[in-house]
Image (tube, rainbow, N blue to C red):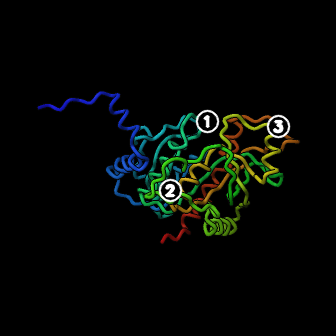
Amino acid sequence: MRRKKEPKSFLMLQEARMTEWERADQARNVISSKSTMKPEIAIILGTGLGKLVDRIDTKLSIPYEEIPFFPVSTMKGHSGHLILGTLAGKEILAFSGRFHLYEGYSVSEIALPIRLLKLLGIKVLIESNAAGGLNPLYRVGDLVAIEDHINLMGENPLIGANDERFGERIPDFSDPYDRNLLDLAERTALNEGIMLKRGVLVGLTGPSLETRAEYRFLRIIGADMVCMSTIPEVIAAVHQGIKVLGVSVISDMCLPDALEPASFEKILGAASSVEPILTKLMEKIILSLQLT
């Protein structure tokens, strides 16, 4: 007897009832069916920083649309592909394009690619983003290693039922950005003659840029730079025991008493202009990574 085809509404209901682990597992199955690579390093390429993929010896490139439950990048400068290949002699996974709350995605949808990393055996996540500079000692084009963050997004990917397979209910965040990786990044930058500063990142939802009063407030509470991404990804990664290194490109200055009008085109251009330097730094860091 021929099996009756389930109505679309029933399938949608079944998908809605799936756990985050089940969704990530389906995404993992698609990737594993296309490649036997077992990378331990993942990279998220932020705004204007997507050309690092040109340095990757790509073995497989999968559009996000072909991965179950993945959101789709809608922002300029985010190509929307998951890439498997080699860089600096090591197998890596790269997300060319990320997702933001201001695009209308939930924090769970933003965290799904990070949940996938747990199932794929990733041990190190390298984050990059374009950020506005709040520290008056910064300049447009500076590279800043993220040493800590302040989450003002009003969202956290760990809210809701906790799956112990990902991590414990109340994870420790005393060092969300791995100290050994920070030290490695600074040593590498010094050896390559690259200026790499340290700073605290604050995250807001956007998409509007902040007001003078908001920039002043963010500086008072201890932030050196501000972005609209990264932090939900880092929270999900640390929850899973993945070590994180983050580097921001200062794409515009946000000094309230000397504030100039900004546009996404200017931010994108500033991030793109420093891309060769960041690409070199990333390659050298990956080359020096000792995974155990």
Q: Is residue 132 above or below residue 262?
A: below
Q: Residue at x 65, y 63 (%)?
A: 174
Residue 48 visible? The answer is: no
Separation (CA) of disc 1 from disc 2? 24 Å
Q: Residue at x 49, y 54 (%)?
A: 56
Say left or right for 27 vs 114: left
Q: Nearer the viewer, residue 36 or 208?
A: 208
Q: Residue at x 80, y 49 (%)?
A: 219
Please report contact status of discs 1 and 3: CB closer than 8 Å, yes or no: no
Judged from the image, the secondary structure of the residue bearing numbered disc 3 is loop
Q: Which mark is residue 192?
A: none
Q: Amino acid at mark 1?
A: Tyr
Please report whichever mark, 1 or 3, sits nearer to the chain's N-terminal start.
1
Judged from the image, the secondary structure of the residue bearing numbered disc 1 is helix
Residue 3 visible? The answer is: yes
Q: Is residue 181 above or below residue 109?
A: below
Please report whichever mark, 1 or 2, sits nearer to the chain's N-terminal start.
2
Separation (CA) of disc 1 from disc 3? 23 Å
- The residue pinned by badge 1 equals 102
Q: Nearer the viewer, residue 276 or 13?
A: 13
Please report contact status of discs 2 and 3: CB closer than 8 Å, yes or no: no
Please report contact status of discs 1 and 2: CB closer than 8 Å, yes or no: no
Q: Amino acid at mark 3?
A: Glu
Judged from the image, the secondary structure of the residue bearing numbered disc 2 is strand
